[in-house]
Image: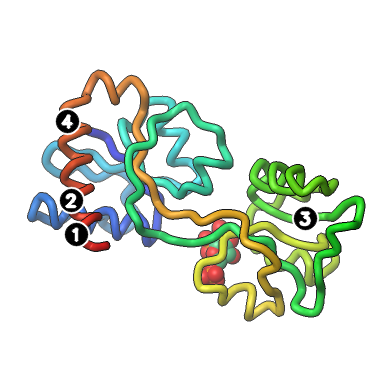
Amino acid sequence: MLTVALPKGRIAEETLDIFSEIFNREFKFEGRELIMEVGDFRFLNVRNQDVPIYVERGSADIGVVGLDVIKEKKLNIVKLLDMNLGKCKVSIGIKKEDKIDWSRPNIKVATKMVNITEHYFAQKAMGVEIIKLYGSIELAPLVGLADAIVDIVETGNTMRENGLKVAEDIMDSSAHLIANKNSYYAKKDEILSLYEKINRVVESRV
Ligand code: PRP
């Protein structure tokens, strides 16, 4: 039995579609259920940011999570495969009439992604005051809480509809298959066999 942590929402659905394609049966969370057992698999329905915690601590053997979350959290896990879904960018956003003046000594940035933000501005040798938020990040520059944001951009609609624009892209992200280190050794055959099957589907879709 393998326990798989999936992030609520579209990535979970797309991952379960891949499982359905591989095993030729339905994998689907019903209503608000958080655990689903089908065949040799148990799926956990968790928040995106929480997937690596379940995997790192061994409550899930494997999981699917965005590269942005992996980079943000400095995790002790095995990264197995880029699943090529849930593609997005981590970008700096500012008001559409603004411009980042890189010669300024510092900037105020609102974000969920504190480490990625710190690292990026350190590379640019610009001081940064980070304001940690948990959602609706796009609001911050509109009401003067921050000069800029660092956030996920997928379609760009959220920024556009709120009068923001991308000033710079920091990284590309997509969903990755990860594994708990102990599980990776203890259940190596099971995990690698699944990895190969998922990889085949992912490659057939490129
Ligand atoms: C993410 C992100 C942006 C939005 C970007 O939020 O924080 O707000 O999606 O997508 P777009 O470029 O397609 O508009 P999400 O909906 O995941 O909610 P969250 O704020 O709870 O993380």
At horizontal 72% and vertical 60% (from top left) the residue drawn is: 149
Labels 2 and 3 touching (C-beta < 8 A) = no
Q: As shown in the figure, which amino acid type bears the numbered disc 1? A: Ser
- Residue at the disc numbered 2: 200
- Residues packed near mark 4 inside 10 Å, few (<14), some (14 to 19) or many (20 plus): some
- Residue at the disc numbered 3: 109
Of the image marks 1 and 4, the number of the one nearer the N terminus: 4
Of the image marks 2 and 3, the number of the one nearer the N terminus: 3
Of the image marks 1 and 3, the number of the one nearer the N terminus: 3
Of the image marks 4 and 3, the number of the one nearer the N terminus: 3
Foreground disc of the pair 1, 3:
1
Quadrant occupied by the C terminus: bottom left
> In the image, residue 41 lies at what x, y percent?
19, 39
Instruction: Calculate the distance from the C-alpha at mark 4 to the C-alpha at mark 3.
Output: 44 Å
Instruction: Calculate the distance from the C-alpha at mark 2 to the C-alpha at mark 4.
Output: 16 Å
Labels 1 and 4 touching (C-beta < 8 A) = no
Say which mark, if any, is on residue 56. none
Callout 2: SS = helix
Q: Is residue 168 above or below residue 46?
A: below
Q: As shown in the figure, which amino acid type bears the numbered disc 4? A: Glu
Of the image marks 2 and 4, the number of the one nearer the N terminus: 4
- Residue at the disc numbered 4: 190
- Residues packed near mark 2 inside 10 Å, few (<14), some (14 to 19) or many (20 plus): few
Would residue 4 be found to the left or right of residue 120 on screen?
left
- Examine the image and state in which quarter residue 160 appears: bottom right
Taking the view exactly as shown, the residue that stands out farthest to the left is 24
Front position in the image: 52 or 78? 78
- Residues packed near mark 3 inside 10 Å, few (<14), some (14 to 19) or many (20 plus): many
> In the image, residue 168 lies at what x, y percent?
67, 63
The answer to whether residue 5 shows anywhere in this view is: no
- Residue at the disc numbered 1: 204
